[in-house]
Image (cartoon, rainbow, N blue to C red):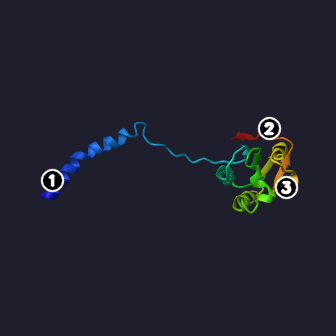
Amino acid sequence: MRTFVFALLFTALLPNLALAAEANAPWGHAKAVEQVYAKEKVVYDVAVDSEAAVRSVISRAVLLANLNGNDPFDTKIVIVLHGDEIPFFAIKNYAKYRDLMQRAQGATQTGVIEFRMCRIAAKGHGFEPADIHGFVTMVPMADAEIVRLQQAGYAYMR
């Protein structure tokens, strides 16, 4: 008898539970679509002040490269550095930021992702090209480099 009462009660409440669940999702549920990405050129404008933020940018760039098939002939991702993250890339700070630098350098191995650094900003932090890891290319000015890349068809990401 007890099982019968429970089953009856559950059956009576079931429509109300469904309505309560739908009240929390009045617009329904998200729809997933499959998308093919290829031949993208992207420039990331990076001026951050934490290891976590740099790691996040690298992770996003690596994910984008993977979604595009990691083909250096079809996809290019340039990460332009010009903020307080610059000291992370200094050779003298390698011991402190070893894991981050290994991740950054590893991201460049396929030829899809490049790091470029503003020479003016680096100088403002007390660094010259000889002070920065060799997988980074110094450019005269970050803003000018970002504009140049956009003119060459690179999409802007912040």
Residue 3 placement, left or right of 138 = left
Residue under pointer 2: 143
Q: Which mark is residue 5?
A: 1
Label 1 vs label 3: CA separation?
A: 77 Å
Q: Amino acid at mark 3?
A: Asp
CA distance for labels 2 and 1: 72 Å
Q: For marks 2 and 1, give the one nearer the viewer.
A: 2
Quadrant where the N terminus is found in the figure: bottom left
Classify mark 1: helix, strand or loop.
helix
Q: CA distance from mark 3 to mark 2?
A: 22 Å
- Counting other residues with Cα less than 10 Å from the Cα at mark 3, is it few (<14), some (14-19), or many (20 or more)? some
Q: How many marks?
A: 3
Residue 113 seen in the figure: no
Q: What residue do we see at 85% from left, 55% from top?
A: 131
Q: Quadrant of residue 19?
A: top left
Mark 1, other Cα within 10 Å: few <14 / some 14–19 / many ≥20: few
Residue located at (72% from left, 40% from top): 155
* Residue type, numbered disc 2: Asp
Q: If you read the primary sequence from the N terminus, does the residue marked by circle 3 or circle 2 appear first?
A: 3
